[in-house]
């Protein structure tokens, strides 16, 4: 059974911003990005504990093909996604969000 999935608004904004950027680069690339996010989310839902814990209770799942990571927390039968973060950004920016 899949865990309940909650995306914080900031994570949704991250996805929208990246989608728009990739779509501006090449028509259809934004859709490829969304598919990579969805594949990552499905893996997290099936195996929420398999990804590395990187800060306190937060885990990091890397997207395939795109330089992004989903940062999430698992607990109480739910998964909360806090950020969809470009891995080249400053880690301090991420810590503020977590």
Image (cartoon, rainbow, N blue to C red):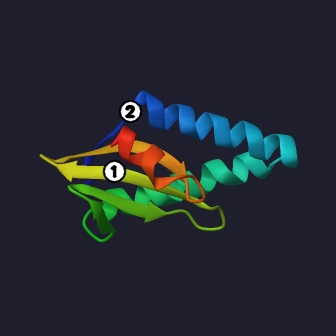
Q: Visible in this render: residue 27?
A: no
Label total for image: 2
Q: Which residue is mark 2?
A: 8
- Disc 1 packing (10 Å; few <14; some 14–19; many ≥20): many
Left or right of 27 in this view: 1:
left
Q: Visible in this render: residue 37?
A: yes
What whole-number distance in Å separates the C-alpha atoms at marks 1 and 2?
10 Å
State the quadrant of the N terminus: bottom left
Residue at horizontal 58 percent and vertical 40 percent from the top: 15
Q: Secondary structure at mark 2?
A: loop
Point out residue 53 in the picture as x, y percentages from the top left corner: 28, 65
Residue at horizontal 46 percent and vertical 32 percent from the top: 10
Residue furthest top in the image: 9
Point out residue 55 in the picture as x, y percentages from the top left corner: 28, 58
Left or right of 14 in this view: 79:
left
Residue furthest right in the image: 26
Q: Quadrant of residue 66?
A: bottom right
Q: Secondary structure at mark 1?
A: strand
**Mark before the other along the chain sequence, 1 or 2:** 2
Residue at horizontal 48 percent and vertical 59 percent from the top: 40
Left or right of 74 in this view: 12:
right
Q: Which mark is residue 38?
A: none
Residue at horizontal 66 percent and vertical 52 percent from the top: 33
- Disc 2 packing (10 Å; few <14; some 14–19; many ≥20): few
**8 over 30 or under it: above or below:** above
State the quadrant of the C terminus: top left
Q: Which mark is residue 72?
A: 1
């Amino acid at each position: 059974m899949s865990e309940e999935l909650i995306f914080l608004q900031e994570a949704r904004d991250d996805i929208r911003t990246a989608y728009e950027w990739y779509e501006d680069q090449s028509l259809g690339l934004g859709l490829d990005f969304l598919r990579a996010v969805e594949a990552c989310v499905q893996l997290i839902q099936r195996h929420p504990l398999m990804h590395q814990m990187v800060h306190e209770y937060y885990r990091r799942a890397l997207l395939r093909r795109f330089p992004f990571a989903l940062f999430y927390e698992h607990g109480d039968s739910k998964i909360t996604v806090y950020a969809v973060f470009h891995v080249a950004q400053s880690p301090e920016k991420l810590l503020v969000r977590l």
